[in-house]
């Protein structure tokens, strides 16, 4: 899947589509008792902005602005929580029409 400029980002609708996905993704995260404690309301806007930057870079074929494992190393995140987050992301991407092959690539970069 690639758009006019050959990137997955273009194919899914560009930055506006990423912003919409991130918004829906975070709505799910803050509603999930298994992971919501990692998403303090005072930091949500900053977290979402960082997520948009990360996805935009990755889907454009660039190196991500941050290594997710390093960025989250200070948090006590369980394998179950990672699975929950990846599951929410996969469901949101499917809802907006991102194909399974592309979702697997994105999910693999997150989980």
Image (cartoon, rainbow, N blue to C red):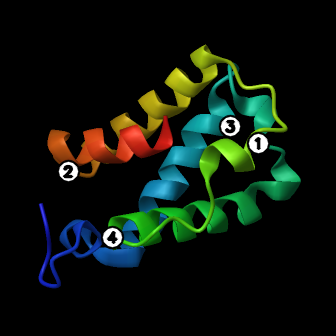
Q: Which residue is mark 2?
A: 97
Of tags 3 and 4, which is closer to the observer?
Answer: 4
Going by the image, does 61 lie left or right of 78? Answer: left
| Residue at disc 2, secondary structure | loop
Percent across and percent down for residue 90 are 36, 37
Going 46% across and 62% down the picture, which residue do you hit? Answer: 55
Percent across and percent down for residue 97 are 20, 50
Q: Nearer the viewer, residue 72 or 99?
A: 72
Going 29% across and 70% down the picture, which residue do you hit? Answer: 9
Mark positioned earlier in the residue sequence (3 or 4)? 3
Q: Nearer the viewer, residue 63 or 10?
A: 63
Q: Which residue is mark 3?
A: 30
Quarter where residue 17 is shown: bottom left
What number is the disc on residue 39? 1
Mark positioned earlier in the residue sequence (1 or 2)? 1
| Residue at disc 1, secondary structure | loop
Q: Residues within 10 Å of mark 4 (few under 14, many from 20)?
A: few
């Amino acid at each position: 899947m690639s758009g006019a400029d050959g990137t997955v980002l273009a194919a899914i609708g560009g930055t506006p589509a990423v912003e919409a996905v991130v918004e829906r993704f975070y709505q799910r995260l803050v509603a999930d008792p298994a992971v919501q404690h990692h998403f303090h309301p005072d930091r949500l806007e900053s977290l979402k902005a960082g997520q948009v930057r990360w996805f935009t870079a990755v889907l454009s074929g660039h190196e991500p602005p941050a290594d997710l494992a390093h960025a989250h190393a200070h948090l006590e995140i369980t394998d179950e929580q990672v699975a929950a987050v990846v599951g929410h992301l996969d469901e949101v991407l499917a809802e907006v029409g991102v194909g399974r092959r592309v979702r697997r690539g994105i999910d693999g970069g997150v989980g």
